[in-house]
């Protein structure tokens, strides 16, 4: 198959058996890769009562159709499993160089099952595929280990690792690569760790067969020339994502002190300018990229060793910086390094520490729970200590290791009210009390609260932040479009920031593969994935689906106390109204259960049969399902 | 004085570039903030994440100088 490595690896970690099978062309064409492949494999292979940290879960490493292509930057690879945080489908996309290297070695997909009898790592050097002992590596930090393995194996190996957080089953553990790129969300690191898999090292020298390399080369060249002068290139190249910090504060959506507030009075100390002036060492780019949004920084905190880190990105600045109230970008960068090396998602990690800080603020946890330490806002020593307790599951750290929802369930005392999460995964770095479409996005997201699948902040601004009218169809459209980049497995910044259109991405796919794919077909595949994941979630967790699409208490009932968005709150009535609108526009019934009609239209009738077996097939909709699900934003002003 | 505003994406539609595909020439009378100038040319300031002028992040209270080339950055993808 042109555009693909051609081989899928099936690895039983319990027996050490490694099978090479030809990558299924139907899987490639009809599910496109990464998120799509993860969805199908999990749905078909994982028993509905499988423990996410048990042997029957699958751990999937999946490239996408665009991985390894320069146009428009197929730098990504997807990791997937049943998430220990949400107990549902999880897919998490990682940039860097790992995905292309895997495909250049000839492999599109790796599916792990079982649990290795001892700590192991997977070694791939073109045709050589081996499980090797990792006893010497177990316990090492992710960043430390990558350096060690490059020394052991060679600089030209691309390495993906977990840290102690993944080894110890922290539900927000991540996978790290290239000294700072992560598959951060959903706890994919914990599942990798549960299988006693410490790392994957790959070297690939075979290249990639392309259907029309001349056309693709010219196409790529033209896009590079066009986008080199795009107005957004210069600021992105200078600041990366950190430039959002000021805007987010001024719009009243910046997480501050565990989302107690939405404007951080000290934001100027942790914004893009501060990063560039105080910390920046160099730019950093993923495979094939000409934006170079990555920033490599040196954290200098008095009394602490200097640390190098890729970042901090906006999300880390929001959820470690603002949410834990750090005033100095160096402290945020230092905290970023700590979490990266331990193998903890900075987003959920920052949020979980912020949640604990609020518990301490309220006297719900005390120094007695913290081994004699305090847990004050903006205190880097306190932050570092509680993170250590979490990673090694000491005392209250064991509760916090379950994320904010799991911790709140264990601590009680109504702390669930300020656990800012949906389905067990923590919100991204945007407060939603004046952003109803974003609240809907978080609460209906198939992997738990994450903006990658739908970022609707500008939709809220353009349609009006004080209304919920018209928000649901726009969210659905975004939930079909944005995950396409996680399915194609390429960076979405080229679309999002420098105007490389989705149609151009499809053109590139066709030049690479020789297919006649259309964008319309891609949207249908994306909708199919979304609905399959919904069915899978209901089958695993019971239903009705509406039971799980709930907003956390603070975000539904507690008006913003101060700042530019003072007094704002979506409120339960508006939220339920949006949900009603969302379900109708999805072709689901009013209980949030997919109907047979939508599942048959999307080509997954067996999912309807499965939902019926568990008693949650959606009731038919009077008048039928909408012909078009989702609507591109049509702002009033334009 | 004359300044140049540049933007891509949706903001470009509002900007109506007239110098090249991204750039609009604007004549400014008096001493005005960027926010005021955006209002006059019909660009909603709520959609401008920041301005990038002379290699530096600026907020919308920035007061341009003659000849400034200012990029208007909309937040589109959320990072």
Image (cartoon, rainbow, N blue to C red):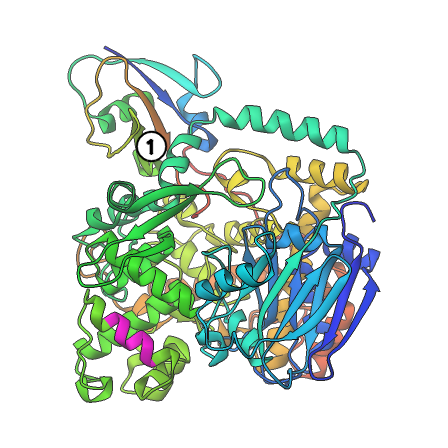
Frontmost residue, A407 versus A534: A407
Q: Is residue A384 magenta?
A: yes
Give the left or right position of residue B57, taking residue A514 as reference. Answer: left
The stretch of residues the image draws in magenta is: A383-389
Estimate the x, y position of residue A76 in percent, counting from the top left. 59, 51
Give the left or right position of residue B50, taking residue A367 as reference. Answer: right
Estimate the x, y position of residue A137 in percent, counting from the top left. 52, 74
Q: Is residue A508 magenta?
A: no
A116 in relation to A81, above or below: below
Give the image quarter of residue A636.
top left
Residue found at x 70% / y 44%? A520
Which quarter shows the C terminus of chain A? top left
Estimate the x, y position of residue B9 in percent, counting from the top left. 47, 32
Give the left or right position of residue A319, taking residue A22 as reference. Answer: left
Residue A621 visible in image: no
**In the rendered picture of this protein, how many numbered marks are placed on residues?**
1
Residue B53 visible in image: yes
Provide the residue designation for mark 1: B44
Estimate the x, y position of residue A212 in percent, counting from the top left. 79, 34
Q: Callout 1 environment at 10 Å: few (<14), some (14 to 19), or many (20+)? A: some
Frontmost residue, A176 versus B60: A176
Frontmost residue, A450 versus A229: A229
A578 in relation to A278, above or below: below
- Asked which secondary structure carries label 1, the reply is loop
Residue found at x 29% / y 80%? A415
Q: Chain of mark 1?
A: B
């Amino acid at each position: 198959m042109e555009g693909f490595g051609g081989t899928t690896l099936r690895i039983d970690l319990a027996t050490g058996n490694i099978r090479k099978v030809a990558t299924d062309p139907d899987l490639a064409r009809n599910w496109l890769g990464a998120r799509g492949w993860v969805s199908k494999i999990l749905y078909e292979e994982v028993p509905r009562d499988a423990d996410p940290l048990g042997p029957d879960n699958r751990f999937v490493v999946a490239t996408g159709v665009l991985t390894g292509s320069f146009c428009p930057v197929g730098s990504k690879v997807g990791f997937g499993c049943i998430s220990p945080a949400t107990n549902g489908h999880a897919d998490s996309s990682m940039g860097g160089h790992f995905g292309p290297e895997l495909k250049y070695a000839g492999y599109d997909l790796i599916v792990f099952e079982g649990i290795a009898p001892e700590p192991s790592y997977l070694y791939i050097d073109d045709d050589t595929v081996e499980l090797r002992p990792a006893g010497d590596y177990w316990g090492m930090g992710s960043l430390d280990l990558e350096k060690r393995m490059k020394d052991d194996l060679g600089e030209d190996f691309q390495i993906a690792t977990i840290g102690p957080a993944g080894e110890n089953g922290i539900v927000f553990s991540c996978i790290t690569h290239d000294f700072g790129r992560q598959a951060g969300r959903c706890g994919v690191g914990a599942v990798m760790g549960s299988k006693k898999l410490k790392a994957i090292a790959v070297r690939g020298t075979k290249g990639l067969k392309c259907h029309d390399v001349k056309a693709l080369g010219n196409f790529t060249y033209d896009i590079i020339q066009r986008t080199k002068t795009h107005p957004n290139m210069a600021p992105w190249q200078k600041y990366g994502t950190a430039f959002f910090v000021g805007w987010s504060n001024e719009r009243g959506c910046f997480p501050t002190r565990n989302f107690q507030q939405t404007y951080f009075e000290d934001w100027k100390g942790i914004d893009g300018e501060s990063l560039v002036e105080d910390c920046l060492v160099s730019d950093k780019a993923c495979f094939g990229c000409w934006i170079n949004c990555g920033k490599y920084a040196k954290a200098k905190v008095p009394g602490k060793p200097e640390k190098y880190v890729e970042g901090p990105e906006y999300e880390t600045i929001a959820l470690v910086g603002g949410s834990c109230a750090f005033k100095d970008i160096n402290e945020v960068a230092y905290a970023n390094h700590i979490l990266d090396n331990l193998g903890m998602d900075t987003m959920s990690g920052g949020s979980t520490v912020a949640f604990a800080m609020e518990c301490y603020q309220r006297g719900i946890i005390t120094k007695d729970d913290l081994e004699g330490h305090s847990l004050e806002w903006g205190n880097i020593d306190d932050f570092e200590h509680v993170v250590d307790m979490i990673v090694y599951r000491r005392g209250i750290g064991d509760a916090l290791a379950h994320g904010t929802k799991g911790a709140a369930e264990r601590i009680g005392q109504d702390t669930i009210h300020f656990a800012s999460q949906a389905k067990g995964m923590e919100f991204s770095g945007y407060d939603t009390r004046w952003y109803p479409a974003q609240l809907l996005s978080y609460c209906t997201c198939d992997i738990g609260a994450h903006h990658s699948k739908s970022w609707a902040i500008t939709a809220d601004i353009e349609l009006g932040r004080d209304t919920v009218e018209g928000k649901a169809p726009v969210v659905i459209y975004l939930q079909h479009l944005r995950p396409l980049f996680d399915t194609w497995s390429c960076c979405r910044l080229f679309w999002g920031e420098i105007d490389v259109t989705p149609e151009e991405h499809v053109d590139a796919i066709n030049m690479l593969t020789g297919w006649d794919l259309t964008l319309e077909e891609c949207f249908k595949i994306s909708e199919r994935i979304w609905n399959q994941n919904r069915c899978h979630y209901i089958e695993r967790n019971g239903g009705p689906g509406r039971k799980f699409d709930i907003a956390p208490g603070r975000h539904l009932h507690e008006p913003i106390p101060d700042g530019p968005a003072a007094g704002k709150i979506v409120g339960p009535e508006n939220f339920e109204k949006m949900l009603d609108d969302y379900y109708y526009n999805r072709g689901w019934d009013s209980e949030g259960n997919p109907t047979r009609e939508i599942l048959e239209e999307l080509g997954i009738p067996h999912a309807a049969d499965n939902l019926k077996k568990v008693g949650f097939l959606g009731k038919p909709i009077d008048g039928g399902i909408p012909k078009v699900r989702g609507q591109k934003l049509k702002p009033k002003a334009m | 004085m004359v300044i140049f505003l540049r933007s891509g994406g949706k903001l470009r539609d509002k900007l109506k570039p007239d110098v090249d595909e991204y750039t609009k020439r604007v004549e400014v009378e008096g001493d005005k903030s960027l926010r005021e100038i955006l209002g006059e040319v019909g660009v909603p300031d709520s959609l401008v994440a920041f301005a990038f002028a002379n290699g530096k992040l600026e907020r919308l209270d920035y007061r341009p100088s003659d000849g400034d080339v200012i990029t208007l950055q909309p937040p589109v993808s959320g990072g």
